[in-house]
Amino acid sequence: MQNESLKFIADAMLGRLAKWLRILGYDVVYEPHISDDNLIARALHEYRIILTMDRKLLARESARNSLGIQSSDYKEQLRQVITQYKIDYQSLLFTRCLICNVPLNFVEKEKIKEKIPPYVYSTQNEFEICPQCGRIYWSGTHRISISDNLQKILNVDATSANYIIA
């Protein structure tokens, strides 16, 4: 299975992990109120890997395509998933909506002028938009902060991780 085709579904206890995997550009369904039966059914139907800390769920025969998350710390969780699936945490970074989980589309600056702060419009040239919710993304200090945090989580040497900061 190639990295880009990895798709996950995270149980209710793993919302923060789901968000970080989306930051890395991976398709992660997160519905905190979904039942175990529906979670398994959706995973099977959509060929998703179940991420869970629920030992009873892991023990079910129908949930065999799953990963038992070992730690309650999201940083350890992220490291575990990246290591287990040899995830590329570079090339898909910031390509997916953190809310809707859909790939972002490039949008021309002029088309969103009224939807972003004037300072952002004057200092940024590249924007992405979520085709589902309309949320607009750009490379600002929040991305640098996220990239710095990711480097710390993954224990990446900052000198070799310049690619992360856009």
Image (spheres, grey):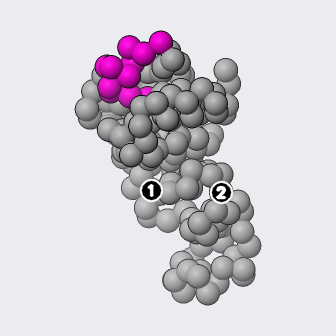
Residue 63 in view = yes
The reply, left or right, for residue 24 in relation to residue 80 is right
Q: Residue furthest left?
A: 72
Residue located 57% across and 34% down the image: 42
Report the front residue among 8 and 158. 8
Q: Is residue 58 magenta?
A: yes
Residue located 61% across and 69% down the image: 134
Point out the stretch of residues depicted in magenta.
51-61
Residue 125 locus on image (x, y percent) = 65, 71
Q: What amino acid is at disc 1? A: Ile
Residue highlighted by disc 1: 144
The relative height of residue 165 versus residue 78 in the rendered view (above or below) is below
User: Which quadrant, please, contains the N terminus?
Assistant: top right
Q: Secondary structure at mark 2?
A: loop
Report the front residue among 138 and 50. 50
The relative height of residue 46 versus residue 64 in the rendered view (above or below) is below
Q: Secondary structure at mark 1?
A: helix
Q: CA distance from mark 2 to mark 1?
A: 19 Å
Residue 83 in view = no
How many discs appear? 2
Closer to the chain start, of discs 2 and 1, is 2
Residue highlighted by disc 2: 104
Q: Looking at the image, is mark 2 or mark 1 nearer the viewer?
A: 2
Say few, some or many: other residues with alpha carbon within 10 Å of mark 2 (under 14 / 14 to 19 / 20 or more).
many
